[in-house]
Image (tube, coloured by chain):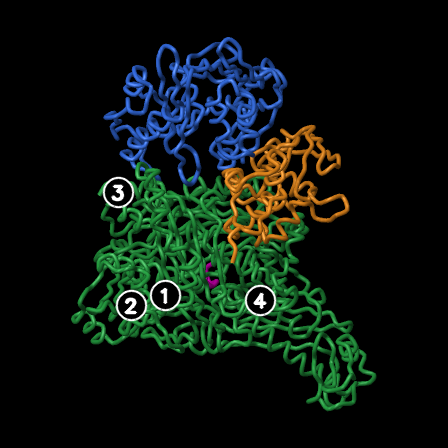
Amino acid sequence: MYSFEIESPVSVADAVAALGKEEAQALGGGQTLIPSLKARLAAPAVLVSLSKIDEIKGISAADGVLSIGGGATHASVAAEAGAYPALAALAANIGDPAVRNRGTIGGSLANNDPAACYPAAALASGATIVTNTREIAADDYFEGMFTTALEDGEIVTEVRFPIPEKAAYVKFEQPASRFALVGVFVAKYPDGVRVAVTGASEEGVFRWEEAEAALSGNFSASALDGLSLPAEGMMGDLHAAPDYRAHLVGVMTRRAVTAAQ
Amino acid sequence: MTKVTMTVNGKAVSKEVSGNTLMTEFLRDALHLTGTHVGCDTSQCGACVIHVDGKSVKACTMFAAEAEGAEVVTIEGMANPDGSLSVIQQAFQDHHGLQCGFCTPGMVMTAAKLLEENPSPSEHEIRDYLEGNICRCTGYHNIVKAIMAASGQDVSGIAAE
Amino acid sequence: MPKDHGIGAAQKRREDVRFLTGAGQYTDDISVYGQTYCAFLRSDVAHGTIKSIDTSDAEAMPGVLRIFTGKDFEGIGGLPCGWQVTDKHGEPMKEPGHPVLAQGKVRHVGDPFAAVIAETLEEARDAAEAIVYDIEELPAVVNMKAALEEGAVKVHDDLSDNLCYDWQFGSDQADVDKAFAEAAHVTTLELVNNRLVANPMEPRVALGEYNRANDESTLYTTSQNPHVIRLLMGAFVLGIPEHKLRVVAPDVGGGFGTKIFHYAEEAFVTFASRQLNRPVKWTSTRSEAFMSDAHGRDHVTKIELALDAENNFTGLRTDTLANMGAYLSTFSSSIPTWLHGTLMAGNYKTPAIQVNVKAVFTNTVPVDAYRGAGRPEATFQLERLVDKAARELGVDPIALRRQNFIDSFPYATPVAVEYDTGDYVATMDKLEEMIDRQGFEARREESRKRGKLRGLGVNCYIEACGIAPSNLVGQLGARAGLYDAATVRVNATGSISVMVGAHSHGQGHETAFPQVVAEMLGIDESMIDIVHGDTSKIPFGMGTYGSRSLAVCGSAMVRATEKIINKAKKIASHLLEAAEADIELKDGQFTVAGTDKSVAWGDVTLAAYVPHNYPLEEIEPGLEETAFYDPSNFTYPSGAYACEVEVDPETGRVEILSFAAADDFGNVVNPMIVEGQVHGGIAQGIGQAMLENCVYDENGQLLSASYMDYAMPRAEDVPFFQVDHSCATPCTHNPLGVKGCGEAGAIGSPPAVVNAVLDALNAGGMTVDHIDMPLSPHRVWKAMQG
């Protein structure tokens, strides 16, 4: 690793100030950032650790909305997001227990790994990503692989998930990393169904609108009969070719709908 | 350099560390607690699992500075106060849950947390919980069996012969 | 009542206590006064010409002590290959140079061409990054077939081409041709044995230390065979005589073959520590391990089986391309030849067999032994082929195997080995009993109702272990003897240190070896300690690989213990004033036969060291004996394995439901340890069959370079295993009757898994002849699409 200083502010305001320094970078749970620092893929001068900021760790449900602090770990979400069981289940299945004890929802959403689980939940739920400066709708937040609407120095302080009537997330794991080779989050709201897919597209997490339309009329796996995605635009790598990923999106979507019943 | 103070295996320690000092480096190099092992650089193998404030974490994916004020337990702190093996450690020996021993500290630390959270886990629950701990020697058979046995379950019927 | 003592007892392992409490001492746990740190600069291209390396800026960086490049190793030896294979025209294999640091060219991603020594690791890494170099990238050869084409880019410019050797072995050509010409049926299969990375959980580490006072170098290293490293590094690379070189392999966190070999980093830290007069330590990262540990397998094979009208195997012919990588690693050349071709008979009495192997240089990491080494490749080809033959002929795959089993021993195969014992019918009977074969169709139906395809796959295996008779392997090209050695040192109070040449890195020698000595002497195991892994303490040894430790080194230990008993009986006869021939040793007491006159073990050992009343005119004081043991044959463990799987027809995902192994290991010293070895081997075999794949792109970039892309088996990928070793036919030529068990699981399991998946698909109405490993969901799904 290159050398850097670590600061551990205890408030969002102090963290924002610290992030204003030259070559400063936020450190959430570090479960992705630290391995990339080890590989010398990043060279911050200052790492601003967010893990001591208690004000962004809360999880609470009110008025049909589950609010999760950006600093909440996957383990906390798994344990405390009972108001949104599909989301709690998703969190309980990210990485492994030790990773879940450090990794945070804010870190995951800020990183926007194309195979991460949380982006699918946020997009399928039409969540609102709250930062120290503004509120961003999930539909406006994800801008492609590892790219989001966040500005430099902006911190995800909270994520607000409207709680759906029914929802489920189904992940087909990449055999080595155990990230999503394809993950599909389906959420049924009174005004329609949203389907978000992670792991599959070269553009990162996306909504499968044809499936949403079909499911909004008939929320059952059979509503998806005959629907498929083209292989074009899907990722291809060691573990899966684009056509296989496209196929899996269909299978996982049907399974998610079934699981959500 | 910043000064960090924490409790490791019940003892207060205070050392100067660089910002980029990982917990693995702090434990192994500064405290000479070499039982916490480093088997990969992508946070996957789990040979470095320790407990920080009662939670399992991968010590290779946490900076020492982030453990300021924390209660840390490593494999060196897992035996009974009289030095005898703890129930989990003893079960690993009784059921041959280790071979080369390199992944073992992480396995024991993870297993200890599993049994705290779930005192009588099923085979499936154990295998699932071990997702972040890779063993290349045992094929996991005797690790899973040892954890079941440590939880008081009867393992005599497992893959008899 | 199971034994709790001596041979056959499932004793708990004494080494576990230190490993379970964090008190093990692995190489990276050792730090010495004045230690410096080393970082290697490794090639990021697969093939290139080194135009220039400018270290001047890097040398001026903080903490940097010295930077070495290939120039510093001019005139110094390269890394040697330990086995000279002779090709089918009688020519020696091509043996390119392998400098410690690359000279002139880099030949694979990860090839080290410079190294920095600095006060701290981060300073060394910073400086390595600051070295300015110009490497002109050349086209790389990755694919073996392409590497052999006329005009292909050459990995080594001084060689005529990329063919290391073209080897042929087995029956007379005419006999093989006749078998195929007269065959009623010929089954043909082309397959890949996927390239693997051994991945012991402990990455490699090397720490070199130089003592100016006595001109002695010490190397602490993660090795399976410290004496071999001392021999190769001392004699071939650095020119340091053995008495000035100590190699220590302390606790080693798994090896699986990849820690057999002598590596550049070992020679480098030893060399550099002498240059700097400071200890030099190198610790591999996992990423570095993927591009510097020798890889395993990587064969492409066409295999054909001739059968007569009654389905008897009449001929077998194979054509294999074996990847050597860019350089010849220590045992690389022997793996696809003598450890592979000699096993092609398998468990079957096929009368005519011909094996052809072309070994090929490519711009990839060197390939060498990985658990099983050659024998898994042989087993996979043969057992996949027999399964395919059964499907083509519409006969039961187990019945076809049974019909062709070798059924009388000793049996001389057409591929030069003589199986001393075995009972393939017994292990197959046992297996069928273990897996409830009768109930399989009902289980298949139950899966079908849940929308899943269930399959059952079976295979046999035979391996040659207990490596190896020195005079035989010498004729075959080995440049070392493959005996082993042990010293039994009995102390005055009767406690014993046994210094063994085998090295334990998970195999439990510290527990199992004392069981043998304890049984022979009738004393408690707690009085006996095993000393291993240090050339300064142990007379000699060839190390641990090829399932050889107990069969070869254990035999040396038995011989040395026999010498101890003989001498102790002489002492006892003197003390008891009886004839030596009348002295019996039982339960730690020397008794005059037929009397109640006896003397205890401790009295005899004390007399040996306090020889006041002692036959000094006949024997020397002291009680220490050394034996070297050279086996007269290989050992031949064998068995039958079965796997049951369920395939998800929508995704191609395969779940392993059960795995059963019926092995014949001959006699067993510690059944708990033996079962653990089989479990681990099976998991690695399932890993090869289902998950693991080391992949290069066409430019020689390593795509599976971390655990993010190289799929290691995890707890949830495997079931509980059923293992049995009750069908034992003891080895006839070593004193313990043991055969070895370390590699069996990895050798025997991949075909069972693949056969099971193909059974599931074909029974599910698809026609799929073969899928290359690993059977990833994607590959299975693709095969199902037709």
Measure the C-alpha gap from mark 2 to mark 4: 36 Å
Whichever of labels 2 and 4 marks the residue nearer the N terminus, that label is 2
> Cα distance, mark 1 to mark 4?
28 Å
Task: List the residue tagged with mark 4.
Answer: C669
Judging from the image, what secondary structure is the residue with disc 2 in? strand
At 36% from the left and 65% from the top, the residue drawn is C340
| 1 vs 4, front mark | 4
Residue indicated by mark 2: C355
Image quarter of the C terminus of chain C: top left
Compare marks 1 and 4 and give the one earlier in the sequence.
1
Mark 4 belongs to which amino acid?
Answer: Val
C226 up-or-down from B132: above or below: below
Local packing at callout 1 (Cα closer than 10 Å; few below 14, some 14-19, many 20+) is many
Element at label 4: loop
Asked whether residue B161 is drawn in magenta, I would say: no
Q: Are the residues flagged by discs 4 and 3 in contact, CB closer than 8 Å? A: no
The image quarter in which residue A119 lies: top left
Residue behind mark 3: C784
Label 1 chain ID: C
Chain part drawn in magenta: C72-79
Q: Which residue is mark 1?
A: C340
- Badge 4 or badge 3: first in the primary sequence: 4
The hue of chain A in the figure is: blue
Depth check: give the residue in front, C390 or C554: C390
**In what element is the residue under mark 1?**
loop
Residues tagged by mark 2 and mark 3 found on one chain of the structure: yes
The mark lying in front, picked from 1 and 3, is: 3
